[in-house]
Amino acid sequence: MKNGAGAAAAGAGSGAGVIAGSSAEAPKKASSGKSSTKKSTTPRVTATKTVISAPGTTIYGHASNKCIEMVGHKGADGSPLQINSCTGKNWQKWDFRSDGTIRSMGLCMDVAWGSSANGAVIQIAVCSGNPAQQFRLNSSNDLVNPQSNKCVDVKDQKTGNGTRLQLWDCNGQDNQKWSTR
C-alpha cells in the first residue's frame, strides 16, 4: 500500500467521512477580501449529549396498574418485556410510530421469532419492518399484533413486578387490557 492509502481504507467503512490527510473541520468559505481573522458564528457540535427524558408514554396494564418495561432495564436486542411499578424511567417509555411499531430505547416491541403461537415471548428487538413488530392499541384497550390477531397478555394473569408478557388469544380479561399515560 502506498503511504496514506491504509488510513483512507481503514476509515472507509467507519462512516467517519474524513479523508486521509484532511481535517475533520467543514470547508472554509471563499474569501470576500475581508480579514480572515473574523470569528465564526457557526455553533460547534459536541460529541456528548445529555438526555433527560426519553420520548414517549408509558403503557400500563389494567389488572395490575403496572407499566411495560424491558427486563434488566437495558435496551438490548431480545430482552423480554415485563410489567413493573410505573416509574416513568426511559425503559418504560414507548413511542407509537406511524409504521405500526412501538419503540423504546431505539428498539421495537416484537413477538419472538415472529411466532403466532400462544405463549410466544413479547420482547424488544432491532427494528426490521417485520410484521411481528406491528402492534395496535385498539378502542377496547387490547394491544394486538395484527399478524397473529392475538393480544399482548400478562402471563398467568399475575400482577406482580417482573411478570413477563406473552402473546395470547384475545379474551377480554384485564391482564390483556392496556392504556397509555
Image (cartoon, helix red, strand yellow):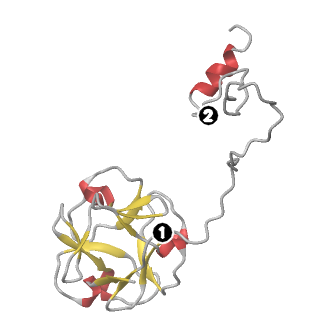
Mark 1 or mark 2: whose residue is earlier in sequence = 2
Amino acid type at circle 1 is Pro
Q: How many neighbours does mark 2 have within 10 angstroms: few (below 14), some (14-19), or many (20 or more)?
A: few
Q: Quadrant of the C terminus?
A: bottom left
Which residue is located at x 70 percent, y 47 percent? 44
- Kindly indicate whether the residue at mark 2 contacts the one at mark 1 (C-beta within 8 angstroms): no
Q: Is residue 127 left or right of residue 1?
A: left
Q: Is residue 148 left or right of residue 47?
A: left
In the rendered image, the vertical position of residue 94 relative to residue 13, given as above or below: below
The percent position of residue 84, horizontal first and vertical second, equals: 47, 83
Q: Quadrant of the N terminus?
A: top right
Q: Is residue 115 left or right of residue 102?
A: left
One can see residue 110 in this view: no
In the rendered image, the vertical position of residue 9 relative to residue 42, given as above or below: above
Name the residue that disc number 2 marks. Answer: 16
Q: How many neighbours does mark 1 have within 10 angstroms: few (below 14), some (14-19), or many (20 or more)?
A: few
Based on the displayed image, in which of its 4 quarters is residue 121 positioned? bottom left
Name the residue that disc number 1 marks. Answer: 55
Check disc 2 and report its element: helix, strand or loop. Answer: loop
The percent position of residue 85, horizontal first and vertical second, equals: 48, 87
Which residue is located at x 57 percent, y 34 percent? 15
Amino acid type at circle 2 is Ala
Give the tally of numbered discs: 2
